[in-house]
Image (cartoon, rainbow, N blue to C red):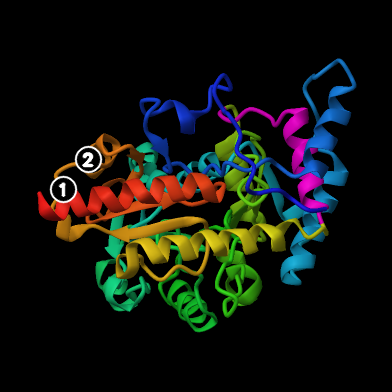
């Protein structure tokens, strides 16, 4: 299978959130939705399911669980019993369910900047939130001393992205070991959003699921996965939580009751096809994204935070002193995600998961916008 990542698709008429947000003369690079065709083995599985004319309520297929178990074993040598896995239509709902596992008088700890839905979890659950900035000057490492100082008697859970969104960090083994020690010493649960786990661009780095790398804290963890990012099927609502502890898993499922709908047949089908993938889709995608990353590095230079994972560039624009980064760049014809929504207003996030011609057009606009802001 050879994927043509250079192919440009017209997404008008598809009600694309990515392409509908801004005026038509603005090129969108904001939400984590790649402008690549999904792989044929996923699309073919969907087409085959649609050969049956009835799309009814659907039970969780045993074959889906087996495919997910095989996927974790193949990529991470992690043997996960079927009973540890809970299926939910989306990682963001699972984050909210996890936060609701904290008692009403409890709280959560979040290193920032972070994927913006994390920053509303405490408000939704009615619990305390403690946010602690990571070390920007050391490539966005977690500040364990500051986190320890910020803990309150109410803090019961820590929530992270691994790999890190929006900074593009792939946490090193020693940092995960320090995290495991921190979680155990402070008697915390750990929720790890690992949805970008396959998208590691630095060939000297390797993603490690926290619960697999440190089984001594596995009973304290909720690990979240979906096939949606690496296979570019973000509109397919199907995700898995790996929860080894029986009591925590029961609490998670209790919080789900009556609030979360089941997953539809297309979600199950597409996810199973993706988890069964042993093709060269991922290596081809990573190779193309590395080429795109080189284009960004050439354009913005030291503004770009060192990026090891994801297809989301984290770019420093502090010196431009922009009052509203999103509005300014949109005026210049490029749609970005403002860093303020992640807890870091001096940055912007740019999605480079797109055909190179489109990216180059966007980078031309980005470069011009930066130059204009510097001189204006």
Residue 121 versus residue 319: which sits nearer the camera? 319
Which residue is depicted at the point 55% across and 44% down?
Answer: 94
The spot of residue 197 in percent (x, y) is 60, 61
Secondary structure type for disc 1: loop
Q: Decide: marks 1, 2 in contact (CB < 8 A)?
A: yes
Q: Residues within 10 Å of mark 2 (few under 14, many from 20)?
A: some
Secondary structure type for disc 2: helix
Task: Evaluate whether residue 128 shows in this view.
Answer: no
The residue sitting at the top extreme is 53
The residue sitting at the left extreme is 376
Which residue is depicted at the point 29% across and 78% down?
Answer: 145
Q: Is 85 left, or right, of 339 in this rendering?
A: right
- Residue 141 occupies quadrant: bottom left
Residue carrying label 2: 328
Can you tell which mark lies on residue 282? none
Q: Residues within 10 Å of mark 1 (few under 14, many from 20)?
A: some
Task: Evaluate whether residue 91 shows in this view.
Answer: yes
The spot of residue 230 in percent (x, y) is 64, 52
Q: Which residues are magenta?
A: 259-277
Which residue is depicted at the point 72% across and 34% down?
Answer: 267
Residue 260 lies in magenta, yes or no?
A: yes
Q: How many marks?
A: 2
Sequence-earlier tag: 1 or 2:
1
Image: 290 above or below 17 = below
Image: 38 above or below 19 = below
Residue carrying label 1: 322
């Amino acid at each position: 299978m050879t994927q043509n990542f250079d192919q440009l698709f017209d997404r008008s008429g598809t009600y694309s959130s990515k392409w509908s947000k801004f005026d038509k003369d603005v090129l969108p690079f904001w939400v984590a939705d790649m402008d690549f065709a999904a792989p044929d083995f996923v699309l073919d599985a969907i087409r085959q399911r649609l050969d049956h004319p009835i799309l009814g309520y659907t039970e969780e297929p045993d074959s889906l669980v087996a495919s997910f178990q095989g996927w974790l074993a193949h990529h991470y040598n992690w043997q996960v019993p079927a009973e540890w896995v809970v299926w939910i239509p989306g990682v963001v709902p699972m984050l909210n369910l996890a936060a609701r596992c904290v008692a009403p008088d409890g709280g959560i700890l979040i290193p920032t900047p972070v994927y913006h839905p994390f920053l509303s979890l405490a408000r939704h659950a009615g619990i305390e939130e403690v946010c602690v900035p990571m070390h920007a000057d050391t490539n966005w490492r977690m500040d364990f001393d500051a986190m320890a100082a910020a803990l309150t008697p109410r803090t019961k859970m820590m929530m992270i992205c691994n790999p890190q969104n929006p900074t593009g960090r792939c946490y090193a083994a020693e940092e995960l070991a320090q995290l495991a020690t921190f979680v155990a010493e402070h008697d915390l649960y750990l929720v790890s959003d690992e949805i970008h786990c396959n998208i590691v661009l630095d060939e000297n780095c390797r993603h490690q699921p926290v619960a697999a790398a440190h089984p001594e804290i596995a009973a304290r963890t909720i690990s979240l996965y979906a096939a949606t990012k690496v296979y570019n099927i973000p509109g397919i609502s199907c995700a898995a939580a790996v929860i080894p502890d029986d009591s925590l898993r029961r609490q998670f499922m209790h919080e789900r009751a009556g609030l979360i709908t089941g997953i539809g047949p297309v979600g199950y089908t597409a996810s199973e096809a993706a988890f069964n993938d042993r093709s060269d889709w991922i290596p081809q995608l990573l190779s193309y994204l590395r080429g795109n990353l080189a284009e960004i590095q050439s354009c913005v230079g030291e503004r770009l935070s060192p990026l090891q994972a994801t297809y989301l560039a984290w770019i420093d624009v502090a010196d431009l002193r922009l009052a509203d980064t999103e509005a300014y760049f949109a005026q210049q014809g490029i749609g970005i995600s403002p860093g303020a929504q992640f807890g870091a207003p001096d940055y912007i996030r740019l999605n480079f998961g797109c055909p190179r011609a489109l990216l180059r057009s966007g980078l031309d606009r980005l470069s011009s916008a930066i130059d204009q802001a510097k001189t204006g």
